Amino acid sequence: MLILSHNVFNERSGTVIALAITSQPQRAGFPLTLELSSPDLPKRSWVKISQIRTLSVGANRQEARRGDPEEVVQVIEGLNEIIS
């Protein structure tokens, strides 16, 4: 999961806003998916922009990571394209 929400939001709401990440090659390109280029990911990965979730802070987030500022901007641009 790619965490988009700020720590203050997470602490006050008890939830996180997250997007699904997959290592399966994606046929759909931007804006539905965005390839992640992070060295901390073990495999080539894509975030599924259309699969946004609100999860409990206590949920098992073993594979969750926070989006870096550039990724967050790209995800927001993708969401805007999907809903506009």
Image: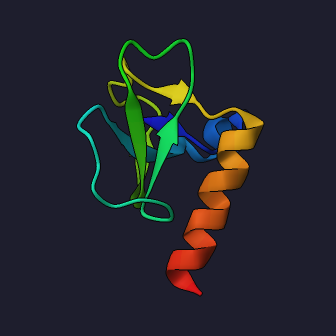
Q: Nearer the viewer, residue 34 or 16?
A: 34
In-front residue for pair 70/8 = 70
Q: Is residue 14 above or below residue 28?
A: above
**Residue 64, percent across and down?**
44, 26
Number of numbered discs on residues: 0
| 77 left or right, relative to 56 | right
Q: Is residue 12 above or below residue 40?
A: below
Look at 53% across and 12% down and name the residue there. 40
Going by the image, does 48 lie left or right of 71?
A: left
- Where residue 62 sits, quadrant-wise, is top left
* Above or below, comparing residue 53 to residue 9 in the picture: below
- Where does the C terminus fall, quadrant-wise? bottom right
Q: What residue is rendered at 50% in x and 65% in y?
A: 31
* Residue depicted at x 62% and y 74%: 80
Say which of 6 and 73 sits in front.
Answer: 73
The one nearer the camera, 39 or 18, is: 39
Quarter of the image holding residue 7? top right
Q: Position of residue 34 (x, y in %)?
A: 49, 49
Name the residue located 50 percent from the left edge and 77 percent from the top edge.
82
With 7 as the anchor, is 37 left or right in this view? left
Q: Residue furthest left?
A: 24
Looking at the image, what colour scheme do you see? rainbow
Q: Is residue 35 left or right of residue 10?
A: left
Image spot of residue 2 (x, y percent): 49, 37
Q: Position of residue 39 (x, y in %)?
A: 56, 13
Q: Quadrant of residue 68?
A: top right
Q: Quadrant of the N terminus?
A: top left
